[in-house]
């Protein structure tokens, strides 16, 4: 694998993760449990899709084959997507969505906090920009974890169950593959081992404050970074890509 | 056309989500220059997903071309990242008159993760007896507040 291939793959991992979880959140539009939350979760979605746009645009330039951000988002199949598996997991009820978001936001924040130091000028600028937005995302999902975990018996159950269920996808945040090895050696990528203890500590503290129980299952479900996805991604792409595939020249 | 005239035209272009605020007062125009009737402009987005940016770009191109500029090149840069500190004093005053509480100073406040202790003054009655209803408001850049004295809800242009 050349450095250029690795860089392209790394862009896809970052861009696809934001795009897919952002798309998932957009499914809440008009269906939020209360008006304020409907607006909040869609604002988070908008930030993430916006962030995805700029990374995919950069990915196209790195690849050098003339593919635009839209080409990459709308014309790739499942096996070419590089997002973390947790991003494609279904929304379920609002408790499940918040747990998924909390696990992702806390990783995303710590990841960007390191990416700021990347020797790649695009990534450092991108990270600095995105970080400002992601702080608000993390604050939002953290507060809901506390409120629901330490709420009623039912709200507690509705976050504890998805926490147990989604936990197996969190190992993937820190799984290092060939792409990381190439890009860490030249100072471009984030050393995931460095942020792992920080993430564990933050998540443990919030889970305890929320009177929830830290899952003990340490099985790590991997594959997203290599294009091996759960069955859910295909359905997302079918919906997301329908229009540009059916009407390739459609414009606003 | 000279720099001064370009500046006057850019002053006419407003943020479509806060139509009293010019893009110069919003701080998204990082630089501009004109050479042989071609204008180069460097813009930076407020939020990554801000849908207003495309409208702003289109408005810039159309107002400059309608006033005789031959070509407009717009470059979008992410770094340095936009901050609400770049909103001018005039801009902040216009926000208050429009009914939006302007952002507090110094945006790089990472302690915001643990909670807000800021007092945001109501743009209508100036009371500081207010509360946050939601961190996310009608647009990406705003949070929703309520004044506990005059009981009016209002938007707060949140720090970034
Ligand atoms: Zn008031």
Image: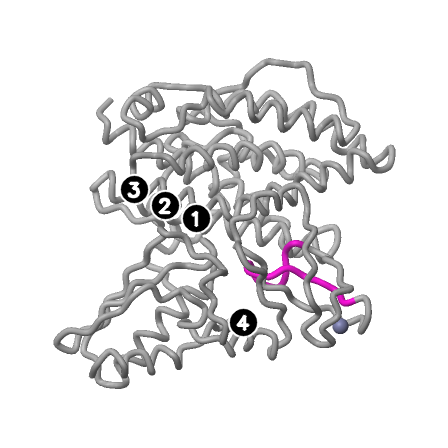
Label 1 and label 4 in one chain? no
Residue A106 position in % (x across, y down): 57, 34
Label 2 and label 4 in one chain? no
Q: Are marks 3 and 2 in contact (CB under 8 Å)?
A: yes
Residue at mark 3: A121
Of tags 2 and 4, the one toward the viewer is 4
- Which residues are the magenta region? B135-147
Estimate how packed mark 1 is, as few (under 14), some (14 to 19) or many (20 or more) residues with alpha carbons within 10 Å: many
Q: Please identify the quarter of the rendering in which residue A140 is found.
A: top right
Residue at mark 4: B92
Of tags 3 and 4, the one toward the viewer is 4
Q: Secondary structure at mark 3?
A: helix
Q: Are marks 2 and 1 in contact (CB under 8 Å)?
A: yes
Q: Quadrant of ligand 1?
A: bottom right
Q: Secondary structure at mark 2?
A: helix
Q: Residue at x 85, y 35 (%)?
A: A154
Q: Which mark is residue A129?
A: 1
């Amino acid at each position: 694998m050349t450095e250029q291939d690795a860089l392209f793959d790394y862009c896809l991992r970052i861009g696809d993760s934001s795009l897919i979880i952002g798309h998932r959140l957009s499914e809440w539009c008009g269906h939020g449990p209360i008006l304020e939350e409907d607006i909040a979760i869609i604002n988070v979605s908008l930030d993430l899709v916006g962030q995805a746009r700029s990374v995919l645009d950069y990915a196209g330039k790195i690849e050098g084959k003339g593919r635009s951000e839209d080409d990459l988002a709308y014309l790739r199949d499942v096996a070419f997507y590089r997002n973390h598996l947790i991003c494609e997991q279904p929304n379920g009820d609002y408790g499940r969505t918040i747990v998924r978001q909390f696990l992702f936001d806390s990783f995303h924040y710590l990841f960007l906090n390191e990416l700021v130091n990347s020797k790649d000028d695009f990534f450092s600028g991108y990270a600095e920009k995105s970080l400002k937005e992601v702080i608000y995302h993390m604050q939002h999902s953290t507060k809901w974890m506390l409120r629901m975990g330490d709420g009623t018996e039912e709200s507690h159950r509705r976050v504890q169950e998805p926490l147990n269920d989604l936990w197996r996808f969190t190992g993937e945040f820190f799984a290092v593959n060939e792409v990381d090895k190439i890009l860490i050696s030249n100072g471009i990528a984030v050393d995931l081992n460095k942020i792992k203890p920080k993430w564990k500590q933050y998540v443990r503290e919030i889970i305890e404050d929320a009177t929830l129980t830290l899952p003990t299952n340490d099985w790590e479900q991997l594959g997203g970074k290599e294009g091996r996805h759960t069955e859910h991604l295909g359905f997302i792409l079918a919906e997301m890509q329908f229009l540009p595939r059916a009407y390739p020249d459609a414009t606003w | 056309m000279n720099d001064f005239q370009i500046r006057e035209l850019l002053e006419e272009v407003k943020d479509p989500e806060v139509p009293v605020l010019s893009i110069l007062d919003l701080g998204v125009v990082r630089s501009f220059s004109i050479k042989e009737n071609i204008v180069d402009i460097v813009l930076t987005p407020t939020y990554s997903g801000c849908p207003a940016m495309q409208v702003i770009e289109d408005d810039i191109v159309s107002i400059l071309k309608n006033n005789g500029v031959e070509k407009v090149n717009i470059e979008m840069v992410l770094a340095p990242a936009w901050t609400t500190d770049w909103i001018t004093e005039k801009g902040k005053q216009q926000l208050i008159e429009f009914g939006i509480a302007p952002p507090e100073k110094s945006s790089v406040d990472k302690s915001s993760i643990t909670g807000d202790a800021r007092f945001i003054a109501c743009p209508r009655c100036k009371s500081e007896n207010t509360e946050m209803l939601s961190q996310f408001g009608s647009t990406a850049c705003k949070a929703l507040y309520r004044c506990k004295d005059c009981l009016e809800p209002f938007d707060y242009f949140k720090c970034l």
